[in-house]
Amino acid sequence: MDKIEIYIDELLEKSTPDRPIWNIEKILQGLKSTWNYIDGCMIKAILEMYAITKDEKYFRFADNFIDCKVREDGSIEGYSVEELNIDNVNAGKTLFELYDLTGKEKYRKAIDLVYSQIEQMPRTGEGNFWHKNIYPNQVWLDGLYMCQPFYMEYETRFHEKKNYDDIFRQFFNVVEHMRDPKTGLYYHAYDSSREMFWCDKVTGLSQNFWLRALGWYSMALLDTLDKADASVGEPYERLKKVFVDLMDAMLKYQDASGMWYQVVNFGGMEKNYLETSGSSIMAYALLKGVRLGFLPENYQTYGAKAFHGICEKYLSEDADGSLHLDGICLVAGLGGKQMRSGTYDYYMSEPVVKDDAKGVGPFLLAYTEMRRAGLIEA
């Protein structure tokens, strides 16, 4: 067993559904962990570990974790559709795979419950889902990952692709309104009302290119394409080009270490640092993009370089032999009670932590792609 599998096993052994050791936000708040996107990221990665290794311990852990949250009638502990929080859709992705693996009807009912939130989400004037009910008229790159792959999988499997046009349109709206033509990068957020203090009053855009947001968006593109029926033709091919163009733009900012900086285009600037979660996502996106045939074979080298760079810089061992993954930005956002401004200094001010699922989950996803590519021996 290699070092990374030992690390995963340590995390699983120290975690329960109520208190997973990787949900640093809940631990710091002293709260029980219920239904949230952070655990969703981690359980999705654990299911990928099961898919690649066929080791039953990963399946058992994932099934037990989600089973504890989902009641027999399909209702979900700690989840409220009425909250209209796009982040809460993310953990729903695990339900498709667990339903296929177990046949538990409550998972199918829970899928429908999560989908019912999508049907109720308020929208911007352009037609995109608000990020949250408490963030009116705002589109954040993060939200595309939280919702659209689930939305696409539901439409493909259970809804005869009736809302494909809506999904594609929401992505193309982001390209139109949030992409910077000079760099090819995307701004973290967009306020279609131009009312928020953090946005440009002409464009509605936030100020900076935050690595993890660009990572979430990269995965949103890739995983949505993966769940779509390619036979729809033009919009599928157009979205694929959006993904390829973003990968090319991001590669211009890849550091010699293989990683990327917290604020992507300001590498080397004071306080800026090489960040684990976004770099892990980029490793995953590049490796999976090659595997799916969206990217040329030689792009695998860039993904592997990113993965190895993270291991060299941030995967470390304690004196007692415990492994840790460091360099993870705990959280970053805009507005809210904290009046987050989206300035460069703001992104430098958020805590950097170890072993949080927002970094560990993508790191494990990248690891599974390294295994699939034969770049790490089983």
Image: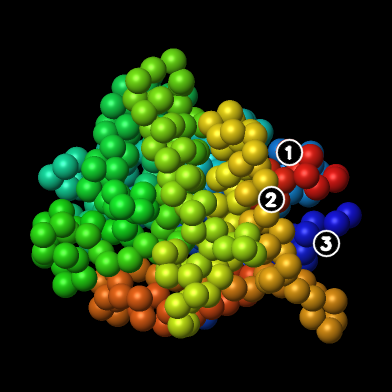
Q: Amino acid at mark 3?
A: Lys
Tell me if mark 2 has few (under 14), some (14-19) or many (20+) residues whose alpha carbon lies within 10 angstroms of its own: many
Q: Quadrant of residue 149?
A: top left
Quadrant where the C terminus sits is top right
Quadrant where the N terminus sits is bottom right
The kind of secondary structure element at disc 3 is helix
The residue identified by callout 3 is 3
Going 31% across and 52% down the picture, which residue do you hit? Answer: 182
**Label pair 3/1, CB-CB below 8 angstroms:** no
Location of residue 202 with respect to 350 vertically, above or below: above
**Label pair 2/1, CB-CB below 8 angstroms:** yes
Q: Earlier in the sequence, mark 3 or mark 2?
A: 3
Which of label 3 and label 2 is nearer to you? 2
Q: Amino acid at mark 1?
A: Ala
**Gap in Å between the C-alphas at discs 3 and 1?**
18 Å
The kind of secondary structure element at disc 1 is loop
The kind of secondary structure element at disc 2 is helix
Location of residue 324 with respect to 217 vertically, above or below: below
Which of label 3 and label 1 is nearer to you? 1
Q: Position of residue 348 (x, y in %)?
A: 43, 79
Which of label 2 and label 1 is nearer to you? 2
Going 17% across and 59% down the picture, which residue do you hit? Answer: 204
Q: Earlier in the sequence, mark 3 or mark 1?
A: 3
Tell me if mark 3 has few (under 14), some (14-19) or many (20+) residues whose alpha carbon lies within 10 angstroms of its own: few
Classify residue 347 as left or right of residue 169.
right
Location of residue 191 with respect to 266 vertically, above or below: above
Q: Amino acid at mark 2?
A: Ala
**Gap in Å between the C-alphas at discs 2 and 1?**
10 Å
Image disc number at residue 373: 1
Q: Position of residue 73 (x, y in %)?
A: 47, 41
Image disc number at residue 304: 2
- What kind of colouring is applied to the model shown? rainbow
